[in-house]
Amino acid sequence: MIPVSDPKRGAAALKDEIISAVTRVVDSGWYILGGEVSAFEEEFARYIGIKHAVSVASGTDALTLSLMALGVGPGDGVITVPNTAFPTAAAITRAGGRPVFVDVDPISRTMDPSLLEKLLKSGSDGVKGGGEIKGIIPVHLYGQPADMDAVNGIAKEHGLFVIEDCAQAHGALYKGKKAGTMGDMAAFSFYPTKNLPALGDAGMIVADNNELAERVRSLRNYGQTEQYIHEEVGMNSRMDDLQASVLRLRLKTLDRDNGRRREIAKRYDVGIKGDFTLPREMEHARHVYHLYVIETEERGALIDHLKREGVGFGIHYPRSIHLQKAYKDLGYNRGDLPVSEKLADTVISIPVFPELSDYEVNRVIEALNKFKHD
């Protein structure tokens, strides 16, 4: 079976270096927020091109702590999209806020600025649950950056903050700017299948604002400003040095690995001939293909076919968040956000990761092109 992703291969390619790095951490005797973490924060900030990088325990925590730092409280609305991983919305809830959903553009699959503007101009009558809107979380989905100039322009007009969800967009570019450098804050995940993967959970918050960076540094560590002195109630969300040591290694190969993902994507673009809708890189973007997601009206039959052909797949995501049981109290119904709902019914992810061989890429293409012809 050709897997849709394979973290083991990536780790195996750096096994000796990883063992050396882990040994260095073990020998240091400092395992949380130590020298490896500080070094990785500095290196990641330099790579992104931003002043501050603050490490945390997960991508979900990165979003949650960013929202807390920006003052989101009970009942505050934060606009995001429903065709994303559940943690995007869950972080809003964990921070005390209320997710408000806006649909996406069917081509980019990212937040539709025209619908965002329409939602905000409709006032509380057009927002599920009413109440004040405090901010926006655009999601750079599958490695494709959202239209940040448009989103930022709308946010400025309405006095809203912007947090970029960069969990799937390490190294992606928007008009030459790195994802994570265009909002008030940005959140990254280093889950083992991400473009920049750890060997477990880990995350990062980035910002240019000194005050916001200092606040999340405190909030990630129980709200401490100095040892055992707490200005506010924070949480335990600290990166450990074992993960940081691995991430320092993987950061060095990120651009090369993203280049391989783009190479595979271009081969799919040219080679796949079936009746599928393929992803499209937008003119403003440099897509890094965390996932290569196609669309088909015959997903069930295609899944059966891929299983027979020995080709792995994923569905990202099979149900829009606004229709999840966990958020039924928000009052959304099927038909409210039709583009996201259609995507949930038609998307399927095919294998794309840096260690995927040319032979495997060709096998995936052949399998897709055989669909309905075998």
Image: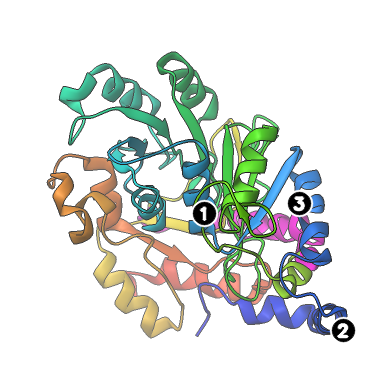
Q: Residues within 10 Å of mark 2 (few under 14, many from 20)?
A: few
Q: Residues within 10 Å of mark 3 (few under 14, many from 20)?
A: many
User: Colour scheme in the image?
Assistant: rainbow
Q: CA distance from mark 1 to mark 3?
A: 24 Å
Q: Secondary structure at mark 2?
A: helix
In the image, what residue type sits under mark 3? Phe
Locate residue 246 relative to residue 1 in the image: left or right: right
Q: Looking at the rendered structure, which numbered label has been put on residue 27?
A: 2
Q: Most prominent secondary structure in the magenta stretch? A: helix
Which quarter of the figure has residue 362?
bottom right
Give above or below for 187 relative to 132. below
Q: CA distance from mark 2 to mark 3?
A: 24 Å
Q: Is 269 included in the stretch rendered in magenta?
A: yes
Q: Which residue in the structure is indicated by mark 1?
A: 234
Q: Secondary structure at mark 3?
A: helix
Q: Which residue in the structure is indicated by mark 3?
A: 44
